[in-house]
Image: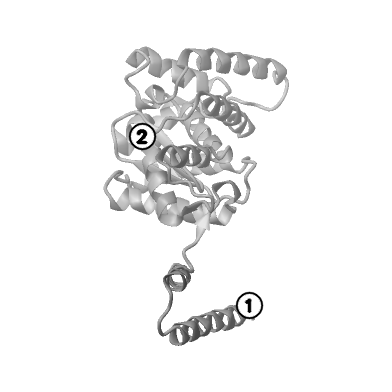
Amino acid sequence: MRHRTRNRWLYGCMACIMAVSINLATPAVSQAGWLDNLLRGVLIWGVQSYQLSNLSDKDEMDFGKQIHQELVNSGQIRLYNNSQVTNYISEIGQRLAKNSERPGIKYNFFVVEDDSINAFATMGGYNYVNTGLIKAAANEAELASVIGHEIAHIEGKHSIEQMKAQARNQGILAATGLDSSQIVQLGVAIAFDFPHSRNDEREADAIGFDLLTQAGYAPEAMASFMTTLKNETGGGGASFLSTHPGTDERIISLQAEANTYTAANAKGARHDIGLNEQHYRNKISPLR
């Protein structure tokens, strides 16, 4: 019914324009300008702008899918498709994501064939982990800590906030918002080129820690993995650390949080899942 009503409105509008065009055989300059503006408005009718602050979960997932396709089709990422490894990463991700406070988002997990130690996430539930980072983790709990951190960025809508900031910086954030192509272009750029703010990282650490422990993983895994990478690379050689500011401060904070959590839950349910290194190496054996 709404579709038919909209069509009647559009046909009426077009008929009105046609009538004005016929009757104004010798229009004045002001009349011609008014008509040009109206015609231009009709021609761009249907181009939708989106307010980033008000995106629905469905819109966000749709844009996430488009950003993913652009990343793959443009060759900016190369997906690693060994089913043993990709299924394993997805299982870890889904175990963490079921505790997310954004249940309307469908989370997806991908392995990127890249030896650099990095992981990132885009809007709409799309998470990526490099093969280099998977190999660098000592066990499943350490890997889960990274995946939980990336899920946390999605839960906190950090990519959307980055988009708004970059759109303002580039002068493309109109009062009506951004069109779909602008959102996708910004999403692709943000995936690689713009590090999260210190506040976003703190929030992602806190949310990621909760996701990690709620899934039963060892609480010390997040601080442990960051410490290992910092010691091995001097704090700057790993992409995952060089684009995440305040490493020392975050390690201290996360280790203190793990100690507090362990003490408070000493007599509760087990929280030591994922520490078996041999089990982990068997699961990721195709990457050797």
Q: In which quarter of the view is residue 98 placed?
A: top right
Residue depicted at x 64% and y 81%: 1
Disc 1 and disc 2: Cα gap in Å? 43 Å
Examine the rendered structure and indicate whether residue 130 appears above or below residue 176. above
Q: Nearer the viewer, residue 238 or 171?
A: 171
The amino acid beneath tag 2 is: Asp
- Which label was assigned to residue 193? 2
**How crowded is the residue under tag 2: few (<14 C-alpha within 10 Å), some, or many (20+)?**
few
Residue 255 on image: x %, y %: 56, 15
- 101 vs 204, left or right, is right
Residue depicted at x 58% and y 30%: 212
Examine the rendered structure and indicate whether residue 40 appears above or below residue 159. below
The answer to whether residue 86 is visible is no
Residue 220 on image: x %, y %: 55, 19
Residue depicted at x 57% and y 50%: 105
The answer to whether residue 101 is visible is yes
Q: Nearer the viewer, residue 236 or 31?
A: 31
Of callouts 1 and 2, which one flags the residue occurring earlier in the amino acid sequence? 1
The quadrant of the image that shows the C terminus is top left
